[in-house]
Every structure is written in C-alpha cells, then in structure tokens.
Image (tube, rainbow, N blue to C red):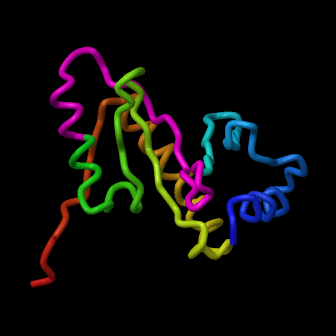
Amino acid sequence: MDANNIINKLSLELNIPDLRFSDEGVVTLSINDEFTTNIEKTADDRSIIVYGVVGELPPLDREAHLMELLTGNMFGLHTEGATLAVDPNTDEIILFKVYDVHHLHFEDFYRDLQIFFSVQKEWMNKVEAREYVYVPMRLHPY
C-alpha cells in the first residue's frame, strides 16, 4: 500500500470525492467544523504523519504545562499511542502519529484515525481548560 492508495480509500470511506494530497503532500480534514487534522506524506513516500493542533503553550507556567504534556505522553496511555509535541516556531501543541505505509492495512488505519480524532478533541479540551486529569497507571501487573 502507498500513501495515495490510503487517501483514495479514505476518500471513499468519508465520501469526500476530491480528497487528494496537495502539492506539498498534505491532506487537511475538517472534523465536524470544530478542528482540523492533517495527513502528510513524507518526501520518500514511506510514511504518513497524522497530526493536529491541540492548543498553544501558555506564556506563563510553561514548565508546569510541559510537565503535564510529558506525563500525557507516558507510554502513549493518555494519547492512544500518539505523541504530543510543541512546535518551537509557533508554540502550538501538536498531537501526531507516524505510520509506515508499506506495513499499513487501511482498515486498521481508518479505525486508528477515528480514535485520533477523539484523542485530538480530548486534548484540545484539556489544554483549553488547563485541566490535565489522568487515570492512575500501573506499570507492573503485580
């Protein structure tokens, strides 16, 4: 499978006939007119990156907010396997996930994409409210 095939199948699944990569290699999806999620193919066409902005790093108490984002990243448990990062040029907090297209089954990607939308919205709400609440984790089953 390649990136274009994935987007073609996604176009059919979402009933968006003209869904295609831009000249820059990006597809932008508007989710319920609430937020956008991007799908970008890498220059070598080996991977696609799904990403979206969840908010902006606040100017005050940055260290505390960064600590909360790092805690949210821990083992991917609060991000469903995606990763939170900060764009150093814009201070935007980005949620992203990278997929190797050569080992990707569309059905798995589509299911994962639906989860990504939910996680992105959840983190948008957390960042906006500055309320980072986590379920306690047990790292060992004993």
In percent of the image, x 31 and y 62: which residue is there? 77
Q: Is residue 14 left or right of residue 35?
A: right
Seen from the viewer's position, the closer of residues 130 and 77 is 77
In percent of the image, x 48 and y 57: which residue is there? 98
In percent of the image, x 46 and y 48: which residue is there? 96
Q: Is residue 22 visible?
A: yes
Can you tell which quarter of the image residue 94 is in?
Answer: top left
Seen from the viewer's position, the closer of residues 107 and 78 is 107
Q: Residue 40: x and y, percent? A: 61, 47
Q: Is residue 33 left or right of residue 62?
A: right
The stretch of residues the image draws in magenta is 42-68
User: Where's the C terminus, which quadrant?
Assistant: bottom left
Q: Is residue 31 visible?
A: no
Q: With respect to residue 7, does 125 lie above or below?
A: above
Residue 133 is covered by the magenta coloring: no
Q: With respect to residue 60, does 104 lie above or below?
A: below
Q: Residue 66: x and y, percent? A: 22, 34
In percent of the image, x 15 and y 82: which residue is there? 141
| Residue positioned most to the top | 59
Q: Residue 21: x and y, percent? A: 75, 45
Can you tell which quarter of the image residue 14 is in?
Answer: bottom right
